Structure formats: structure tokens, C-alpha cells
Amino acid sequence: MSEENEKLGLLAQLVKMAQSDDKIRDVEFQFLLSLAAQMGVTKDEFKRLFEENIEFRAPKLESERIVQFQRLILLMNVDLEIDEREMEYIKDLGIRMGLHPSATNTVLREMHDYENKIVPPARLIEIFTTYHN
């Protein structure tokens, strides 16, 4: 899979997350657009995410999967509302990406303890390290 397809797959996963509660708020759309720009994705490629079903494959490196999980959490919280469908979607994606369910549940529980629900990177790594086999 090319780097471009991998980026589009990661963004497509985020778009599906935003759509999981049946609506994409403007703040969510702007967040997605900002991420796309940071990843070097053009506006035309970004538009494709809403028109096509783009395949997602979890990143090979666990550190990249954790970063993607953190992006999902940021997106879920950007509109200051957490829908139960979003929560279920993010838990399912964590499992599909090969992240330990107890670790993802711990992150989702602890995010409420931090400003803007952003778990600090050191704590995030600590949580996932705790659940390594």
C-alpha cells in the first residue's frame, strides 16, 4: 500500500468516525480538513473520502496505531459531545487496529481527567505499555 493510500485510509477512518453519529458538525469537518492538510492530502483527495469507500489498513507499527487512536479521540471530542455510537465505533476500531481492549478502555475512561480530554503522550504510552503481552 502506497504512503498516499495509507494516509487516505487513515483519514477515511476518521471520516467514518465523524459520521458514526449520523452528522458531521462543522467543527469536526474543519478538524478533518486540518489533519488532511497536515498529512499533505489535497482538497480533491480529501473530497474523495466522502464519495468513495477507501480501504483502511491499520499501520504496521504500534506507535502509529496509538497515534491514530489518539486522533480518533481528538475527533470524537472536538464537538464537545460524545455520542454512544462514536464510543462504540472507537472501541471497535481499537480492536481492529490490534490495540489491547483494556488499554483503549483505560484511555477512554481517563481522557475525562485531562483538559480538553487530551491524554498526555507520556501517559498514553504508559497505558499501552502496561497491557503489552
Image: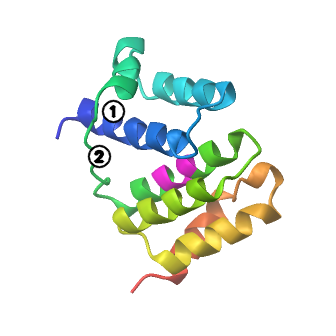
At label 2, the amino acid type is Phe
Residue 98: x, y in percent? Answer: 35, 68
User: What residue is disc 2 on?
Assistant: 56
Q: How far apart are marks 1 and 2 (CA)?
A: 8 Å
Tell me the quarter of the picture where residue 11 sits: top left
Residue extent of the magenta highlight? 68-72
> Could you tell whether 94 is left or right of 58 in the image?
right
Q: How crowded is mark 2: few (under 14 residues within 10 Å), some or many (20 or more)?
A: some
Q: Earlier in the sequence, mark 1 or mark 2?
A: 1
Residue at 82% x, 53% y: name it.
115
| Foreground of the two, 18 or 43 | 18
Residue at 28% x, 39% y: name it.
6
Q: Is 100 placed above or below 64 here?
A: below
Decide whether the magenta segment is chiefly helix, strand or loop: helix
| Foreground of the two, 92 or 9 | 92
Location of the C terminus (image quadrant): bottom left
Query: What colouring does the structure picture have?
Result: rainbow
> Could you tell whether 1 is left or right of 74 in the image?
left
Tell me the quarter of the picture where residue 107 sits: bottom right
Q: Is 15 placed above or below 43 here?
A: below
User: What residue is disc 1 on?
Assistant: 8
Q: Which residue lies furthest to the bottom in this view?
A: 133
Residue 122: x, y in percent? Answer: 64, 64
Q: Is 121 placed above or below 106 here?
A: above
Location of the N terminus (image quadrant): top left
Residue 40 is marked as none
Q: Is mark 2 on a helix, strand or loop?
A: loop
Can see residue 41? Answer: no
Residue at 28% x, 57% y: name it.
60
Q: Is mark 1 on a helix, strand or loop?
A: helix
